[in-house]
Amino acid sequence: MERNRDTVTQPPPAVGSAGKILRILLVEDHAPTRSAMSRLIRAAGADVVTARDGEEGLGYLLTQRFDVLLTDLRMPVMDGFELMQQCQKLPDSHRPGRIIAISGEYEAGVLRGQTVEFLAKPLDVNALLTVLSGRPN
């Protein structure tokens, strides 16, 4: 949200088509970033589950259904690249409808040829919420 002295600009709601509330799996190893992003996305109306690395995220993907996987690319244990590869092996019932990769170390070119959206860190909150409310890739 942007604040000035008189008004608060509300971000676009994190809802999918037909007003459906999005279920988002946020995989981010940096705890303060994970916490801040989770709060902002929840405030926009989405249901958020968080994981601290790709291995924990994969565990959630194996047992739950998510509309969006929002993953950092550089993480310990299992990075976002490997997590995205593992997503391709999941049955359709557990594969997220969209994948959004985030990174401060890499550029969008590292994802060339993949059906993945990309956002650079530091994240622009409005850009993140706009991408989340967009159509599946």
Image (cartoon, helix red, strand yellow):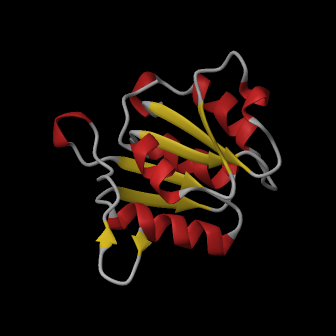
Above/below status of 94 relative to 64: above
Question: Is 6 placed left or right of 50 in the picture?
Answer: left
Q: Residue furthest bottom?
A: 5
Question: Is 96 placed left or right of 71 in the picture?
Answer: left
Q: Quadrant of residue 83?
A: top right
Question: Is 76 placed left or right of 24 in the picture?
Answer: right
Please tell me which residue lies in front, 32 or 66.
32
Q: Residue furthest left?
A: 18
Position in image of residue 118 (x %, y %): 62, 37
Question: Is 119 placed left or right of 40 in the picture?
Answer: right
Above/below status of 99 relative to 53: above
Q: Quadrant of residue 80?
A: top right
The residue that appears at 42% across and 30% down in the rendered structure is 97
Position in image of residue 126 (x %, y %): 46, 54
The residue that appears at 39% across and 41% down in the rendered structure is 65
The residue that appears at 60% across and 45% down in the rendered structure is 58
Position in image of residue 14 (x %, y %): 33, 50
Above/below status of 12 relative to 69: below
